[in-house]
Amino acid sequence: MTTDTNTINTSGSTSDSPIDGPFDPTPGITAAEAARTRLDFAQAAPEVYRAIIRFDSAARAGLDPALVELIQIRASHLNHCAYCLHMHTNDARKAGESEDRLHLVAVWREARHFFTPREQAALALTEAVTLIADGGVPDSVYTEAAAHFDERELAQVLSLILTINTWNRVALATGKVAGTDERTR
């Protein structure tokens, strides 16, 4: 058995020299953003964009910020939205979320001991609502979520799931580039 000794340098090409430092995605992000040809949703439909922001803000009101990020991360995984996944994992880190939990959100069922029963119920509901075309929201999933959240909280969780699914679709439809964050503009 031979071992490949090629490594990736910071320019992204393979070489026989060791890595000069951590990979810097900035040039790739800049190039991808410059090549982006789809509309800027916030600029093209500002009233709609602001309405989604208000919906998102109302949905998260009163919910635990860690739970909010877990829901947003899981929906973004399911929707294959790299833009939102990058944004919400960074937000979760800034809020103190552990790397272990962030790495395990996508496989939370196999790592239940990292998540509270309440978080598990929210993640299961997130999956069911996000993948609603695959069979709706099973009664068992809804009942489990209702056991962990009062009616107001459950409505907030459902609203948050709806908003992140909307944001994922906006980002994917308009070709948003992971690593950029228009909230910082």
Image: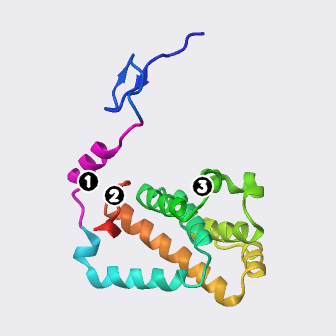
Residue indicated by mark 1: 33
- Residue 172 location, quadrant: bottom left
Q: Which of 168 and 20 is in front in this view?
A: 20
Categorize mark 2 by other alpha carbons within 10 Å: few (<14), some (14-19), many (20+).
some
Task: State the separation of the CA atoms marked 1 and 3.
Answer: 26 Å
Count the marks: how many?
Answer: 3
Residue indicated by mark 2: 180
Let me know if residue 24 is in the magenta part: yes
1 or 3: mark nearer the eye: 3
Q: Quadrant of the N terminus?
A: top right
In the image, what residue type sits under mark 2?
Thr
Provide the secondary structure element on which disc 2 rests: loop
Let me know if residue 109 is in the magenta part: no
- Mark sitting on residue 102: 3
Q: Which of 70 and 45 is in front in this view?
A: 70
Q: Determine if residue 132 is in view.
A: no
- Mark sitting on residue 48: none
Is residue 135 toward the left or the right of residue 111 in the image?
A: left
Which residues are drawn in magenta? 22-39
Provide the secondary structure element on which disc 3 rests: helix
- Residue 98 location, quadrant: bottom right
The answer to whether the residues at label 2 and label 1 have Cβ atoms under 8 Å apart is yes
In the image, what residue type sits under mark 1?
Glu
In the image, what residue type sits under mark 3?
Leu
Q: Where is residue 46 in the image (x, y as percent from the top left)?
A: 27, 81
